[in-house]
Image: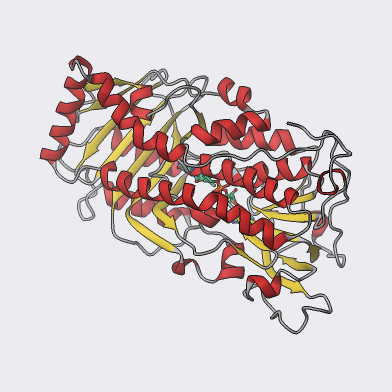
Amino acid sequence: MPATGSHSRTLCTPPTPRTVLISGAGIAGPALAHWLHRYGFAVTVVERAPELRTGGYKVDIRGAAIEVAERMGILQDIHRASTDMRTGAYVNGDGTRIATLPAEILGARTGRDDEIMRGELARIHSERTRGDVEYVFGDSVTSISPTPTASSATTAGPTTTSSPTASSKLDSVEVTFERSSPRRFDIVVGADGVHSTVRRLAFGPEERFVRHLGGYISAFSLPNDLDLDREELYHALPGKLVCVYHSAGAPAAKGLMTFRAPRLTYDHRDAMQQLSLLGAAFMGHDTGTPPTGCWSEIPRMLEAAREAPDFYFDGLNLIEMDRWSSGRVVLLGDAAHCPSPASGQGTGMALVGAYVLAGELAAAGGDTARAFGRYEEEMRGYVTVNHRLTEKFAKEMTAGSWPAIRFRHLMMRILPYMPWKNLVAKKIAEGVQRAANAIALKVYPVPTAPPTVAPAPPLAAAPSITATRSTT
Ligand SMILES: Cc1cc2nc3c(=O)[nH]c(=O)nc-3n(C[C@H](O)[C@H](O)[C@H](O)COP(=O)(O)OP(=O)(O)OC[C@H]3O[C@@H](n4cnc5c(N)ncnc54)[C@H](O)[C@@H]3O)c2cc1C
């Protein structure tokens, strides 16, 4: 129910705090920016990449996330950009289809659930918020320091690692950037993904919060040489799974390669290192030839990965944290609770988290500690259920041996002819649906016309700013 401008202090006047810096223009960041703008906050989004990152695989929007998309007014955009997949088939080494299943069963989707390319969703968010929110591309936060009020100056330390109670009295935070001038914000949100810089600065090194689930995943564009039309082809090898698919209206196909491995040491920003890990996983280390029985598409996929402008590679990692806020700094999306790409829930969780965080900030009328506490209370159970689901999926994603692969193929081949196939499909979808709906969304009233608040100004001029900052 939309509130009118005269209902309450928290709604009709800009709530204090008012200026918010969001680090990361992925999925969570722009979704939060959308809501905060509607509540009357002045939002700046800083993104390390020089432009919007539109890479990635297709992602599911299910359950509570569909509800949030509807409240955001983007559900129709999502349906319009749907991948509209028809079928998925497992193929053997010579590309023969062994078993074909409808896309809904493979994706465990029901009702209004949909599937969209991650990049399309990022584009929808960016287009929706571009006119209302300040975007700074090609930059990153380098330090976050609380600016104490007189009453809290003695309790807060020089960094944001002080206790939430002490630091919640702080007035604002001073932020320095790699390129832009320092600025002061009331709140800083880390929506900068699984390798979050804000999390490192405010909570400590990534290693403290990462749990590796034993695998790696890569996604990239490749030419649609197989002439696929809204179809995906899977090929399984022991400990590995590859997939090539084409989604509705896409100019190219997409490749996905996943493999089991213990934690590997590499630089998450060095694509060349990641490409060589991928190559080593799929082609023999010594021989450089693909393993026996492997799909002839695999060498072509590895070649395409090297050329792809949107190459993505990451571990199947969970981010687990006891709390998501410290003083005026709060984490959102993958930065707070990455469920790993194995879950198919990361994007939905990012949308839901953005909705809840913005709603609680607006409802708390300036009491940031209360807002962050409630955000966490609302989200914690939902996140936990989804993390448990991920652990299960990560184990099942790849079969360990040829007999296990053959058994899986057999089950898929006979499933369409089984009298109880609908029951099996329902059972497969049940766990996913339970996790996707494991939160009862509150209704946070939204003012019809948000007040205009100016973004936080720079604290000092920086000579490099005009050359490096692009504000859309
Ligand atoms: C290019 C890309 C491809 C992806 N592909 C897949 C996929 O195929 N399958 C899947 O399940 N998940 C994928 N993901 C992750 C998926 O998008 C997230 O799980 C989910 O959508 C949650 O979104 P998020 O906004 O929290 O994180 P993300 O979508 O990861 O967004 C984080 C954003 O923060 C930016 N960023 C990082 N560091 C900084 C910094 N220091 N300063 C400013 N900005 C920073 C990143 O460039 C990115 O734009 C991908 C993410 C990216 C960035």
Q: Is residue 333 visible?
A: no
In this rendering, is residue 97 above or below 402? above
Quadrant of the snapshot with the N terminus: top right
- Residue at 32% x, 26% y is 426
* Closer to us: 450 or 145: 450
> In this image, 165 relative to 383: left or right?
right
Q: Position of residue 256 (x, y in %)?
A: 38, 38
Q: Which residue occupies the extreme front position in the image?
A: 7
Which quadrant holds residue 273?
bottom left
Task: State the residue lying farthest toward the bottom.
Answer: 154
The x and y percentages for residue 414 are 16, 20
The reply, left or right, for residue 153 in relation to residue 73 is right
Q: Which residue lies at the image location 20% right of the left edge and 51% below the top edge?
A: 287
The answer to whether 59 is drawn above or below residue 208 in the figure is above
Picture coordinates of residue 325, whole percent (x, y): 61, 63
In terms of depth relative to the viewer, which is nearer, 236 or 30?
Answer: 30
Q: Nearer the viewer, residue 94 or 421?
A: 421
Q: Is residue 426 left or right of residue 161?
A: left
Residue 308: % across, % down: 48, 40
- Which of the 4 image quarters holds residue 165? bottom right
**Considering only vertical position in the picture, is 248 above or below 266?**
above
The answer to whether residue 312 shows anywhere in this view is yes
Which residue: 38% across, 20% down? 228
Q: Nearer the viewer, residue 241 or 284?
A: 241
Q: Residue at x 24, y 20 (%)?
A: 421
Quadrant of res 233: top left
Q: Quadrant of the C terminus?
A: top right
